[in-house]
Image (cartoon, rainbow, N blue to C red):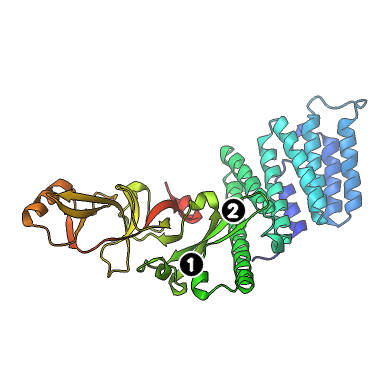
Amino acid sequence: MTKAVNYVQEGKLILDGLPLEDAKIGAAILMLTKQAEDYRAQGQYEEAKHCCDKAIALAQDPDLDKPDELDVKYAEGFVKMHLGTIYFSQGKLQQAADRYQQAQKLFSERNRPYSEGISWMALGTVYYAQARNNLENIGTSDNEWKEALKAYQRSLDIFHKLDKPVLEDRIRERLTTVNREYLQAMEKYCYKKTTREEEQEKVSEEEAEVTQLAFTLPSGEEVLKIPVVAKIAAGIELTLAQENITDHLIMDKETARNATFALRVKGNSMINAHILNGDYVLIHAQNAVDNGKKAAVRITEKEEEAVLKRFYKEKIDEEEYCRLEPENDQEPTIIVSLKELKPGLKERLAKKFKRPDAKVKFLVGIPAIEGEVVGVIRTFREMQSSP
């Protein structure tokens, strides 16, 4: 984990993003918020709040003459941002979040997208700080992490539309950091929970190796820890043996789609199915699939390296064979039969399934289906670089 959030420094970054030279805020209100920021920087928080209270009273007083260009609601939102940052600098995170939310609504009502983007960024920072302060309870509540990701994403969307690349880059960096630390925290919780449950229930080592970890959040959402395996062996128990697991993916139940394990894709044989080199494919362990389904298949029983292909079980002149189809015109169709096919049958199949840049490949063996592909996961870095 990175070091804890520096409230004072983060508060300065938030206020530095606000548009100070704006006549619609009003010169008097700008002066008061400038005084408030000076007090905040010196740690004189009560004096800073007093300046903000005076600025809000000035904006809301119906008896005072105000400049024609003054936008009272917008000015009030501007002051609420300063108040939120004063609370944030004190570590009073809930009070800070309340003020930032009020500012965001006022900016939205007044159609001030740039300031609204800053307010969403501020909210993301507060929620992230709350999440960091609540790491030990991540297994029972992870709302702060989700709210931080949501707020930063809203900020990123706004700055993208406004063509603000510097702010976009800053928010993308924050999104990457929050997402990484969230997954690290969840994985740490999973490890602790696994150890605790193993001690309590005294499960055998073999059972522990193939048990899919699941726990339920307060929202009712079930989160799963899916093992990433280096290779597929003969049978799910061997596939999920501890020495064969290289990593884990943590995801909600809907995304997991009943997956038993995951494989890291090597090569480009399935690119037309949007499965790219480096992706993770989610596999539901089963020994049969319907024709045309994408599956992880060991071409012969002796092989441990599985291939990802569309699987078909077919006949030609009463001779049974299995056809493994890639999703890439430069890769060959693979025909697997229990015994060597007659030359005439081979010629017919080769003509039927030949691709422009690849010949049909014939093998003798017993193809072993180890599971059906139920989903694809692409890493954040790869998504960013994809066209």
Residue found at the far left of this picture? 344
* Other residues around mark 1 within 10 Å, as few (<14) / some (14–19) / many (≥20): some
Residue 218 is situated, as x and y percent measured from the top left of the image, at: 68, 52
Depicted 29 relative to depicted 93: above or below: above
Residue 148 is situated, as x and y percent measured from the top left of the image, at: 66, 50
| Residue at disc 1, secondary structure | helix
Query: Mark 2 vs mark 1: which is more N-terminal?
Result: 1
Name the image quarter holding residue 137.
Answer: bottom right
In the picture, the quarter occupied by the N terminus is bottom right
Depicted 225 relative to depicted 171: above or below: below
Depicted 76 relative to depicted 150: above or below: above
Between 344 and 125, the one nearer to me in the picture: 344
Q: Which of the numbered marks, if any, corresponds to residue 210?
A: 1
| Residue at disc 2, secondary structure | strand
Residue 303 is situated, as x and y percent measured from the top left of the image, at: 28, 69
Between 304 and 40, the one nearer to me in the picture: 304
Count the numbered circles shown: 2
Depicted 197 relative to depicted 181: above or below: below
Q: CA distance from mark 2 to mark 1?
A: 18 Å
Inspect this view and state whether residue 364 appears: yes
Q: Amino acid at mark 2?
A: Glu
Residue 127 is situated, as x and y percent measured from the top left of the image, at: 71, 52
Q: Is residue 281 left or right of residue 63?
A: left
Q: Residue at x 65, y 65 (%)?
A: 2
Q: Amino acid at mark 1?
A: Val
* Other residues around mark 2 within 10 Å, as few (<14) / some (14–19) / many (≥20): some
Q: Is residue 253 left or right of residue 354?
A: right
The residue singled out by tag 2 in the image is: 222
Inspect this view and state whether residue 279 appears: no
Between 81 and 265, the one nearer to me in the picture: 265
